[in-house]
Amino acid sequence: MTIRYAVSRACIIFILAAVASMLTHDATAQTVNGRVAAVTLYRGQAQVTRAIPVDGDARSFEVIVGDLPEQIVQDSLFAEGGESVEIRAVRFRNRAVGDQPREEVRALDREILETQRQIELNQKRVALLGRRAGYLAKLEGFVAPTAQNDLSKGVLDAEALEKITTFSFSQHEKIAEEEVQLARAAHELNEQMQLLQRKRAEITGGASRTVREAVLFLRKNAPGAADVRLNYLVNNCGWSPSYTMRSGADRRQVRVEYNALIHQLTGEDWSDVNLTLSTASPALSAAGPGLAPFHVVLANESVAQQQQSAANQAGSAANQPMENLFGPQGTNPYGRGVSKAAMLGQVRGINTQRNEVAKAVGNSIKFEEQSSFNWTLNDLACALQQLEINGDATTLGVLRNEDSEEADGLSLTYQLPGGVSLASRSDQQMVRIMQTDLNSRFYHVAVPVLASYIYREAELLNTSNEDFLAGPVTVYLDGRFVGRGELPTVARGQTFVVGFGANPQLRARRELADKKDDVRGGNRETRFDYRIVIENFTNEVTPVRVMDRLPHAENGTDIRVALGEPSDPISDDKLYNRREKPMGILRWDIDVPASASADNARIINYHYTVEYDRQYVVSLPAAKQTLQEEFQRLQQDRRKQ
């Protein structure tokens, strides 16, 4: 009994000591907001670092960091203290605060109450008018049958009927006038009420609000001043690249101004901070994605497709993605007998889902949530691997091409020099990332089959210390604005092409000089003679790349196309010969003399023959989408060398 009493007494003493310690902590808690010292800005979030000064003796205490932004990610808080300060714990809390109502607020409340009473009185008058109108309707319903009955008996009192009728119409007129007046009064009272409520909201906007705070439990190991770094993620912010390119009259160099367009609506101003721009995705999770086994079985293809169709219908009905052996909802797990366009859409859809789920894995902390995202990520990867196993040549070609596109996967970081200030506001803000001069090689491009204008282009080599992300570009030549465009992602040491607008002093046209048909056996052979005319109205020799095209047979052998010997040799550029020439694209690299116009214009002559079965005619292929995707790839290749 004595031992139990001693133990109970010891427990009580321990609890009282703990309570006293907690009270001591609360009493000695420091409130320090600190300052935003550094920001790493991602594409859709930012990691903010606050410097929190702590001073005093070596002891344990709390620090309350207030004025945290509205867009903070609550689970992202963590703190670093260095050698002299040990961080025991960090927690986030919301706290409601309010102010005592002022006299002007109480006066507005009295006005609002009086206006509300007038609105209610007006409503009662409207209701009374309705009752009056209803009474008149009943009176008219009684008078009319009575008058009809009296008239049939010959005892109708005409004077009394006239008085009742006059009274009824006069009352209807009064009711109509009063309805108009009451409607006008109701409109004015409602406007007055809205105005009073807006005034009250403006005055009391900060009177009742939620304060976001971080509570830090610290242990100082040495007396004196020290710094604690509080880090957290915020939403509703991001950046995108933007470029300005300028070239002078000598055309030897192009000045590249690399800027960042920033949107910042976090609810917190960043003043004189060390700003880092990053294309990475901030990850809260310390653990990477887990790899699940790739289980496979043998199944009858027709039965499996029926099961997949049923699973897709069930998934559509539930509005949820299906996760099963045969791949995500809406996919063909075999990749055979499907058009290139359909397979391309399927692979891109899976890759898009995989990227989104990968981001969710990086931002998840709880085990169950992360495990669920991990399973979905593995399921999507299994769908792609299943296509690799079962797919035909078309499917494998699509998979190879999609895997080679890594431009969006670049993870770049730009550390901006000096302090940067960015207020939390709705409009975009611009900061300079870098500025550099790149050597350039200017030339002109003529595509007379499409347009008569000839456009300037500059071939640039990225000799800077930074990679360029894909983004919009504004172009100036000789100090004049010439147009806008888009820059591809360019690595350090890579060559790229920038357009500098049309040159109004150059013209090009394409003329069909002659066409001859001939029948040889069962085939038709047609010869086409073309003339390309380039005019130069300047007083200097101008290099021009002239582009044209031959028919390109889809099936290879059913249409035979042969190019004759042109008047100027086809370009020997290696990239052109590898990428474009096999597709029937023609290119000449020529110099157009000064003042070459009219009879003195620079002319290129060439011809080609087309041979095919005379029972057929030449037509265009139906698969427009696949051809458009092929063209887009060629355009991307032309912008980057």
Image (cartoon, rainbow, N blue to C red):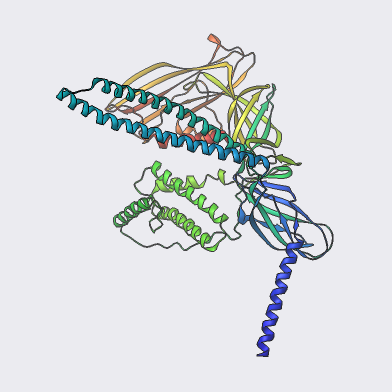
Above or below 602: residue 205 = below
535 sits left or right of 393 in the view: right
Residue 223 showing in the rendered view: yes
The residue shown at (26%, 31%) is: 141
In x, y percent, where is residue 347? 44, 47
Is residue 527 shown left or right of residue 446?
left
Residue projecting furthest to the left: 153
Indicate whether 414 appears above or below 377: above
Q: Nearer the viewer, residue 540 or 342?
A: 342
Which residue is found at the position 76% from the left and 60% from the top?
A: 82
Q: Position of residue 186 (x, y in %)?
A: 48, 32
Quarter of the image with the N terminus is: bottom right
Whole-percent x, y for residue 343 in the image:
40, 45
Image quarter hosting the C terminus = top right
Residue 456 x, y percent position in the rendering? 59, 24
Residue furthest bottom in the image: 1
Q: Is residue 104 above or below residue 615?
A: below
